[in-house]
Image (cartoon, rainbow, N blue to C red):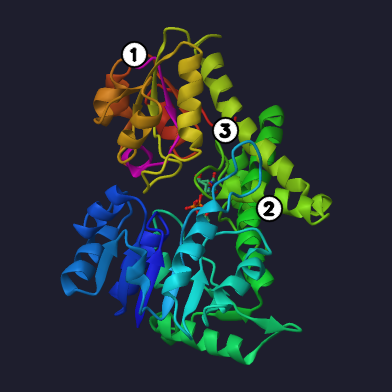
Amino acid sequence: MRLSVIGCGYLGAVHAAAMASIGHEVVGIDVDERKITSLSKGDAPFFEPGLQEILTEGISSGRLSFTTDMSAAQGAKVHFIGVGTPQQAGGYAADLTYVNAAVDGLLPYLSEGDLVAGKSTVPVGTAANLAGRVAETGATLVWNPEFLREGWAVQDTVDPDRLVAGVPSEDGHPTTEGERCADVLREVYHTAIAKDTPFIVTDYATAELVKVSANAFLATKISFINAMAEIAEVTGADVTTLADAIGHDARIGRKFLGAGIGFGGGCLPKDIRAFSARAEELGKGESVAFLREVDAINLRRRDRAVDLAVTALGGTVYNKNVTVLGAAFKPHSDDIRDSPALDVAVRLHGLGAKVTVTDPAAIENARRIHPQLDYVEDRDQALTGADAVIVVTEWDEWRRDLDPAHAATLVTGKIVIDGRNCLDATAWRSAGFEYHGMGRP
Ligand code: UDX
């Protein structure tokens, strides 16, 4: 099938390449010339495992191309909208400028029977607002939210755990046109459908809410365990053991109960804020008032990590060499948007510490935004001479591959703060380190 993908960021570029990899003919469109030049050459403009391979393969097969020219969308049967919906400057609500611009830009190139499939995370009600504009061209709008995790984006796109299609509906049931749209999407995702991936057909509002509520739930789960970490800190309990123990309850589950410096990235923080803002607009602010608390708990954990470093270094970090292991908001990504890791590094620098940051993928991005910090590519070089080490992103390079006995030969002060509770505390203590976890004795 011929497809177009408008917006070639973390979501759109992966979607375009993944759709080509399952046999579709895809054109990716973006206003950013630099991104398009890079993608056209088969170079992934950001770090995402597996993306490089499917990009190269798609381009050499002739099924995948990229352009800044919106008219290239003409002739595609489904047009995916994968542009960003950032937090508004000066507010919590989502900024829909790019979604509106993408849809308006696309309108002249739509044909009778085309589908415009929104994938961006949007406030509930957005699809209903856009549907009329699309319908005037003879095309139909559907909402097909994306649940990909960065670092696993290719796998999550090709082999998702569920597919959701918000289609035109009446009285809670898809209209005839809605059924047709669902069938077209089944054809798009034919490989996942063949594997019996759950395919949920619903109305616009439900589809939009599935996405924001999934992210709200995940954020709440992380803040829940971080709240328990705060209680553990004043009672001498160990939040990691607690998470293991409650995680054995199948109704709770162990995933997303990793206590530490909390969540960040381009989705969870802004999505829960946008959800709160939208609920307020709908007169239902109190229904998701807990999300404010989820946000507040999350941000407090960054303070806690900084406090641990200050206390461990004797009350001040001024002029101390602090090595920060990590910059990306999570491992297997070079994304530093709202990264708790970098926030901790910047705060320590603000308190006068001599901060050295290392990260296997995110140094270039971090340097661009925070040039005041020192960046070192080599992990061992970064550790050399440290008065304290703080782990803020749980990359395998230190979680798994760093022998604490080796680290002990490099550092000046044997203090380690495990902001992700990802190190083997016993091994680090045996190597002579003073180990501080988050919510652990
Ligand atoms: C998230 C959702 O998982 C995904 O479904 C949605 O499409 C986009 O938002 P992503 O932002 O890639 O994906 O990251 P995710 O793996 O969810 O992690 C988010 C943040 O939570 C990271 O900063 C991570 O370090 C943190 N986290 C995760 C924890 O602090 N503890 C955990 O137990 C799990």
Callout 3 environment at 10 Å: few (<14), some (14 to 19), or many (20+)?
A: many
Whether the residue under disc 3 has CB within 8 Å of ligand 1: no
- Where on the picture, by quarter, is residue 135? bottom right
Which span of residues is magenta-colored? 386-400
Q: Nearer the viewer, residue 59 or 37?
A: 37
Residue shown at the point (69%, 39%) measured from the top left = 227
Q: Can residue 137 be seen by looking at this rendering?
A: yes
Determine the secondary structure under disc 1.
loop
Residue shown at the point (65%, 66%) measured from the top left = 129
On the image, numbered disc 1 is attached to which residue?
412
- Say whether residue 350 is left or right of residue 56: right
On the image, numbered disc 3 is attached to which residue?
438
Residue shown at the point (25%, 63%) measured from the top left = 55
On the image, numbered disc 2 is attached to which residue?
275
| Cα separation between marks 1 and 3 | 23 Å
Q: Nearer the viewer, residue 375 or 280?
A: 280
| Residue 394 shown in magenta | yes
Whether the residue under disc 2 has CB within 8 Å of ligand 1: no
Q: Please state the horizontal and vertical placement of residue 408, each as a whole percent of the image.
A: 32, 22
From the viewer's perspective, is the residue at label 1 or at label 2 nearer? 2
Marks 1 and 3, the one that precedes in the sequence: 1
> What amino acid is at disc 1?
Thr
